[in-house]
Image: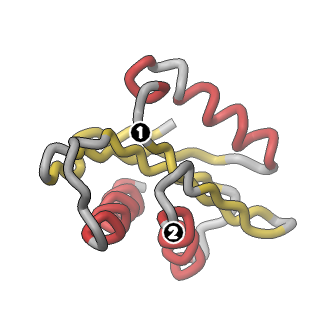
Amino acid sequence: MVLIEGVVSDRGSKYAVSGGVVTDRAGVDAFLKELKRKKKYAKATHNTWAVLLSDGPLKNDDGEGGAGQVILQMLEREDLRNHVVVVTRWYGGKHLGGDRFRHVATCVRTYLEAL
């Protein structure tokens, strides 16, 4: 598991990104379970994720409408398969509007550069 914290901080919201190799939905579930063993991540406002598996793409916005699609599109552009990417957000009390999508993209870019 690769975990990068402190990627973005904006109006009190903080973002982190994590990811790792998975081969199926059960692998995604196991990855998320392992991530959420860290109390900080279990209490996060959103753990949005996406993955391109051999049997098709999967994504979950976890209440951050549209964020999973942003991650998925970036994975498709890079053709990064069998690799789940999770963007975690701790809400800071102020709405970010469309900036939240830019922050999700920044997190994914940071993760891809770290590979």
Mark 2 lies on residue: 66
Q: Position of residue 107 (x, y in %)?
A: 33, 58
> Could you say which is closer to the camera, residue 103 or residue 23?
103
Q: How many labels were placed on the picture? A: 2
Amino acid, disc 2 = Gly
Amino acid, disc 1 = Thr
Task: Report the side of 19 relative to 31 (left or right).
Answer: left
**Marked residue nearer the N-terminal end (1 or 2):** 1
Q: Position of residue 13 (x, y in %)?
A: 22, 46
Query: Which quarter of the figure has residue 57?
Result: bottom right
Q: Is residue 84 above or below residue 98?
A: above
Q: Position of residue 14 (x, y in %)?
A: 24, 43
Tell me which colouring the rendered structure shows: secondary structure
Real-space Cα distance between discs 1 and 2?
A: 15 Å
Q: Outermost residue toward the right?
A: 55
Mark 1 lies on residue: 45
Q: Outermost residue toward the bottom?
A: 77
